[in-house]
Amino acid sequence: MILTSFYSLLLAAFAALSPCKKKDPKPIGDNIEILLKNYHIVFQDILTPIDWNKWDWREPWSGDQPTQKENTMWVKENTIQEDRGVCLQATREGDLNYCGMISSHKFLEWKYGYVEVSAKIPPEGFKYWFAIWMYDKNGWLPEVDILEMMKETSQSLSFTHHWLKNGVHESDGNTFKWKQDFSNDFHRYGLLWESDKLVWYVDGLPYYECTSNIPDVPLFLICNIQSQEFKRLFLPNEIPMCGLVDRITLWQK
């Protein structure tokens, strides 16, 4: 089981990320549709309805118990079926936040390809810390964060990846601030993973690329809502809040 010290290390790593290399979001390449001509869809789910025989509402390390980190617990009741996909809901009872999650660890992990998640993120950024991410179920790292809300508003999107080097957790990433608020509508958040690079996409356009410390083991996908640093308790006027996911697609060569 992952211990509290792990969360302290994780949050310290986020804080230690180098300053943004490029604050203005400008595409660095072509639309993903051009690249996908050489790929084919190997998995797609519109999550209507969500198939609990495949998806899980917990991370794999918590087994049959709800996943809990600090004051935040993920429970099945907070992953709610909607007409369009699923609502990952944030609520609170007493001294615990209750949140929604979907995880593919029971049925889907992969190595290399392009994955895209269509989602309508919650407002106010880090307050609800919405995330779309991948990691190795056999030992956490490497981890790739396709999207994280790490700033005060939902105009800013953070892209990060984490790895072990000589037994030490290292990470690199970037945060961009757009003029638009991404909580106003659905958008597509994607990651191209090849043997020599990671490329982050928003609505089909690439905005950030890494070419070192590329994962070379299969990873699985998580989408979840959570509280800031796992600790901050939601205020009564902040809940319930929902992040919506309505399509997940994986392409491979």
Image (cartoon, rainbow, N blue to C red):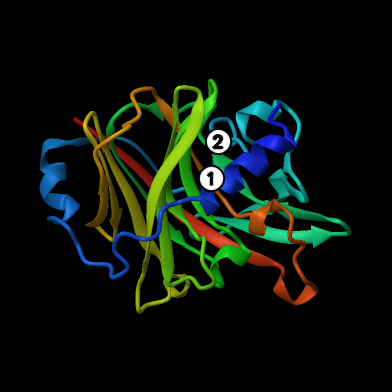
- How would you rate the neighbour count of disc 2 (Cα within 10 Å): few for under 14, some for 14-19, many for 20 or more? some
Helix, strand or loop for disc 2: loop
Q: Which residue appears at 33% of the width and 24% of the height?
A: 216
Judge whether 197 appears above or below 186 on screen.
above
Helix, strand or loop for disc 1: helix
Identified by mark 2, the residue type is Trp
Judge whether 225 appears above or below 37 on screen.
below
Choose between 115 and 1: the one closer to the eye.
1
Identified by mark 1, the residue type is Ala
Q: Which residue appears at 34% of the width and 43% of the height?
A: 249
Q: Quadrant of the C terminus?
A: top left
2 or 1: mark nearer the eye? 1
**Residue 81 placement (x, y as % from top left):** 60, 54
Choose between 141 and 171: the one closer to the eye.
171
Q: Which residue is mark 1?
A: 13
Choose between 246 and 196: the one closer to the eye.
196
Find the distance from the CA under tag 2 to the CA under tag 1: 29 Å
Judge whether 57 appears above or below 207 on screen.
above
Residue 55, label in figure: 2
* Residue 136 in view in this figure: no
Residue 61 appears in which quarter of the rendering? top right
Residue 86 appears in which quarter of the rendering? bottom right
Count of all numbered marks drawn on residues in the image: 2
* Residue 143 in view in this figure: yes
Q: Which numbered disc flags the more N-terminal residue, 2 or 1? A: 1
Q: Which residue appears at 72% of the width and 32% of the height?
A: 3
**Residue 201 placement (x, y as % from top left):** 28, 54
